[in-house]
Amino acid sequence: MISGLFFIMRSLAFTFFIIIILQIRIGPMTLEERAFHWAQNSSVVKPIQMAAESGVHLIQQSWNRLTRRASQESSQRLQIKFERSRQYFQSKGQDLRESFSSSETWGSEGEED
Protein backbone atom coordinates (compact mmCIF):
# COMPACT_ATOMS: atom_id res chain seq x y z
CA MET A 1 0.00 0.00 0.00
CA ILE A 2 2.71 2.47 1.00
CA SER A 3 4.95 1.37 -1.86
CA GLY A 4 2.10 2.03 -4.33
CA LEU A 5 1.55 5.49 -2.87
CA PHE A 6 5.30 6.13 -2.99
CA PHE A 7 5.36 5.09 -6.69
CA ILE A 8 2.51 7.52 -7.51
CA MET A 9 4.23 10.38 -5.67
CA ARG A 10 7.54 9.64 -7.40
CA SER A 11 5.80 9.53 -10.83
CA LEU A 12 4.08 12.87 -10.18
CA ALA A 13 7.36 14.47 -9.09
CA PHE A 14 9.14 13.15 -12.19
CA THR A 15 6.32 14.42 -14.44
CA PHE A 16 6.41 17.90 -12.90
CA PHE A 17 10.20 17.94 -13.24
CA ILE A 18 9.98 17.10 -16.98
CA ILE A 19 7.27 19.75 -17.53
CA ILE A 20 9.39 22.41 -15.80
CA ILE A 21 12.51 21.44 -17.80
CA LEU A 22 10.57 21.60 -21.11
CA GLN A 23 9.54 25.21 -20.35
CA ILE A 24 13.16 26.43 -20.49
CA ARG A 25 13.58 28.86 -23.38
CA ILE A 26 16.66 28.52 -25.56
CA GLY A 27 16.67 31.19 -28.22
CA PRO A 28 13.23 31.98 -29.65
CA MET A 29 11.69 28.60 -28.69
CA THR A 30 11.22 26.54 -25.53
CA LEU A 31 12.49 22.98 -25.31
CA GLU A 32 8.89 21.78 -25.61
CA GLU A 33 8.40 23.73 -28.87
CA ARG A 34 11.72 22.39 -30.21
CA ALA A 35 10.73 18.80 -29.38
CA PHE A 36 7.35 19.29 -31.01
CA HIS A 37 8.93 20.88 -34.10
CA TRP A 38 11.43 18.02 -34.36
CA ALA A 39 8.67 15.43 -34.02
CA GLN A 40 6.75 17.02 -36.90
CA ASN A 41 9.66 17.71 -39.25
CA SER A 42 12.14 14.93 -38.51
CA SER A 43 13.43 12.85 -41.42
CA VAL A 44 12.45 9.80 -39.39
CA VAL A 45 8.86 10.99 -39.01
CA LYS A 46 8.28 12.06 -42.65
CA PRO A 47 7.96 8.51 -44.09
CA ILE A 48 5.65 7.55 -41.25
CA GLN A 49 3.56 10.66 -41.89
CA MET A 50 3.40 9.87 -45.63
CA ALA A 51 2.34 6.28 -44.92
CA ALA A 52 -0.35 7.49 -42.52
CA GLU A 53 -1.65 10.03 -45.07
CA SER A 54 -1.74 7.33 -47.75
CA GLY A 55 -3.64 5.03 -45.42
CA VAL A 56 -6.17 7.74 -44.64
CA HIS A 57 -6.57 8.48 -48.36
CA LEU A 58 -7.07 4.78 -49.14
CA ILE A 59 -9.70 4.41 -46.43
CA GLN A 60 -11.46 7.58 -47.60
CA GLN A 61 -11.55 6.47 -51.25
CA SER A 62 -12.73 2.97 -50.31
CA TRP A 63 -15.49 4.38 -48.14
CA ASN A 64 -16.64 6.75 -50.91
CA ARG A 65 -16.76 3.91 -53.45
CA LEU A 66 -18.57 1.63 -51.04
CA THR A 67 -21.22 4.20 -50.11
CA ARG A 68 -21.64 5.30 -53.73
CA ARG A 69 -22.15 1.69 -54.87
CA ALA A 70 -24.52 0.96 -52.00
CA SER A 71 -26.59 4.06 -52.73
CA GLN A 72 -26.77 3.20 -56.44
CA GLU A 73 -27.86 -0.37 -55.70
CA SER A 74 -30.44 0.73 -53.17
CA SER A 75 -31.84 3.36 -55.50
CA GLN A 76 -32.11 0.77 -58.27
CA ARG A 77 -33.82 -1.71 -55.97
CA LEU A 78 -36.17 0.86 -54.48
CA GLN A 79 -36.99 2.60 -57.73
CA ILE A 80 -40.76 2.57 -58.07
CA LYS A 81 -42.16 2.51 -61.55
CA PHE A 82 -45.79 3.11 -62.27
CA GLU A 83 -46.31 1.51 -65.62
CA ARG A 84 -49.75 0.50 -66.82
CA SER A 85 -50.46 -2.03 -69.48
CA ARG A 86 -52.12 -1.19 -72.77
CA GLN A 87 -55.13 -3.26 -71.70
CA TYR A 88 -55.56 -1.12 -68.57
CA PHE A 89 -55.65 2.10 -70.59
CA GLN A 90 -58.08 0.57 -73.09
CA SER A 91 -60.44 -0.54 -70.32
CA LYS A 92 -60.29 2.92 -68.68
CA GLY A 93 -60.92 4.57 -72.03
CA GLN A 94 -63.92 2.31 -72.59
CA ASP A 95 -65.25 3.15 -69.11
CA LEU A 96 -64.94 6.89 -69.86
CA ARG A 97 -66.71 6.53 -73.21
CA GLU A 98 -69.52 4.66 -71.52
CA SER A 99 -69.84 7.24 -68.76
CA PHE A 100 -69.93 10.10 -71.31
CA SER A 101 -72.42 8.34 -73.56
CA SER A 102 -74.73 7.56 -70.63
CA SER A 103 -74.64 11.17 -69.45
CA GLU A 104 -75.58 12.88 -72.72
CA THR A 105 -78.16 14.81 -70.79
CA TRP A 106 -75.51 17.23 -69.46
CA GLY A 107 -76.14 19.77 -72.12
CA SER A 108 -79.89 19.50 -71.78
CA GLU A 109 -79.86 19.96 -68.00
CA GLY A 110 -78.53 23.51 -68.33
CA GLU A 111 -81.26 24.40 -70.87
CA GLU A 112 -84.11 23.42 -68.59
CA ASP A 113 -83.48 26.24 -66.10
Image: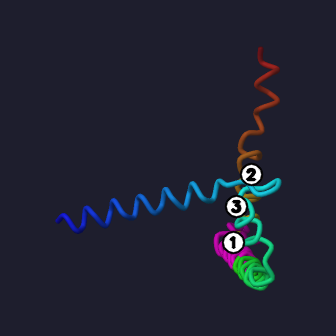
Task: Determine whether label 2 and label 1 are within 8 Å by CB.
Answer: no
- Left or right: residue 81 versus residue 7 is right
User: Could you say which is closer to the camera, residue 4 or residue 106?
Assistant: 4
Labels 2, 1: front one: 1
Q: x%, y% of residue 64?
A: 73, 74
Disc 2/disc 1 C-alpha distance (Å): 42 Å
Question: Disc 2 designates what residue?
Answer: 96
Give the structural element (helix, strand or loop) at label 3.
helix
Q: Residues within 10 Å of mark 3 (few under 14, many from 20)?
A: some
Nearest to N terminus: mark 2 or mark 1: 1
Question: Disc 3 designates what residue?
Answer: 31
User: Could you say which is closer to the camera, residue 16 or residue 53?
Assistant: 16
Give the structural element (helix, strand or loop) at label 1.
helix
Q: Residue furthest left?
A: 1
Q: Which mark is residue 1?
A: none
Where, by quadrant of the figure, is residue 74 drawn? bottom right
Question: Disc 1 designates what residue?
Answer: 71
